[in-house]
Image (cartoon, grey):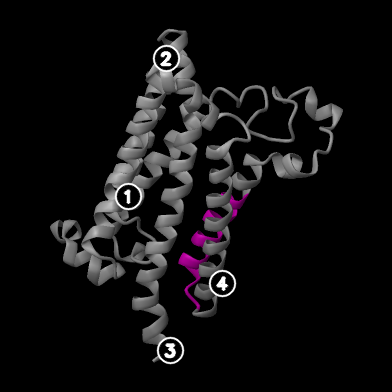
Amino acid sequence: MKKIFTVDFFYEKYGITKNTVKIIVITPVVITALMMVVLLIPSTSKMGFWLLDENKPIEILTFIVFILAGFYGLNLSIKLFKFKKLFPALLYFIFSFCLIFLAMEEIAWGQWFFHFETPDSWKEINLRNETTIHNIDGIQGNTEILRLIYGVSGLIGIWFYRFYKFKDVYVPIILLPWFIVIIFHGSIDFYADIVSVGNRADLILQESSELIELLIAISSFIYLWLNSKMLKKDVFIPIVN
C-alpha cells in the first residue's frame, strides 16, 4: 500500500511527473483558501460573490469542465467496450453520463443560451423558476448531501486499490485532498442547516458551494484523465501489440 504514495509509482502508473503530482495535490487547497480569503476581506468580498453568482465565471467554468469530462469519459468507455472490458466500460459510461447531466443542470438545460420560458408546472415546484432539478423544492438547500456523497465515494474509490477486480477503475490517491476539501465544506454546510452559524457565515457557505461544484468537476476530469493514461499503458497498448 505504501508504494502508491511514491512519485515513482505515479510516473510508472500514469506517466506524470513529480511537479504534476504536486499541482494536483495542492490545487484544491489553494483554490479554496484563496476564495475564502477573497470572501472574508470586505474590500474583495463583492468581487468574490460576483464570481460565485449564477451564470458568472465559476458556474460557467464548472459547466465547461463537466461537459468536457463527460464526453472524455464516454470516449474512454467506448474504447473499453471495443476491448471487451465490460465492467470498467459500464462504470465509466454511467459516471460520464452523470457528469453530462450535471453540466446540463448548470446551464438549466440550455435555458441560459436559448432563453426559453420555464413551463408553468415546473415553476410551481422550482424555487428559481428554472428548468433544473437541483432547484426543486426539497432539493435546493440540501445539495450538500450530494456533495458529501461524491466526496465519500471518492474515498471509497481510493480504497478500491486494494482489490484486483477494481484495478481499472479505482481512484488515484493523489485526488485525496480534493475529496477532503469537498467533504469538509459539505460537513460544515450540513451542520449550518441544523445549527445557526450567523447570516454572514451562512451566505459564504451557500455561495462557496459553487466553488465546491467546480472542484467536483475538475477532480472528475482528473480521475478520468489519469485512469485513461493508466488504461492506455495497461490495457490498450498491450492488446494492440
Cα separation between marks 3 and 2 = 55 Å
Mark 4 nearby-residue class (10 Å; few <14, some 14–19, many ≥20): some
State the residue position of label 1. Answer: 175
Q: Earlier in the sequence, mark 1 or mark 2?
A: 1
**Residue located at (42% from left, 68% from top):** 228
**Residue located at (72% from left, 26% from top):** 126
Q: Pointers 1 and 2 in contact (CB under 8 A)? A: no
Q: Which residues are magenta?
A: 84-100
Cα separation between marks 1 and 4 = 24 Å
Cα separation between marks 3 and 1 = 30 Å
Report the mark closest to the observer, 3 or 2: 2
Report the mark closest to the observer, 4 or 2: 2
* Residue type, label 1: Leu
Dividing the picture into quarters, in which one does residue 112 lie?
top right
Cα separation between marks 1 and 2 = 27 Å
* Residue type, label 2: Ala
Q: Pointers 1 and 4 in contact (CB under 8 A)? A: no
Q: Position of residue 66 (x, y in %)?
A: 55, 50
State the residue position of label 4. Answer: 78
The disc at residue 72 is none
Above/below status of 160 relative to 121: below
Report the mark closest to the observer, 3 or 1: 1
Q: Earlier in the sequence, mark 1 or mark 4?
A: 4
Circle 3 sits in a helix, a strand or a loop, which is it? helix
State the residue position of label 2. Answer: 201
State the residue position of label 3. Answer: 240
Q: Is residue 70 left or right of residue 130?
A: left
**Residue located at (48% from left, 41% from top):** 214
Q: Pointers 4 and 2 in contact (CB under 8 A)? A: no
Q: Pointers 4 and 3 in contact (CB under 8 A)? A: no
How many labels sit on residues? 4
Q: Pointers 3 and 2 in contact (CB under 8 A)? A: no
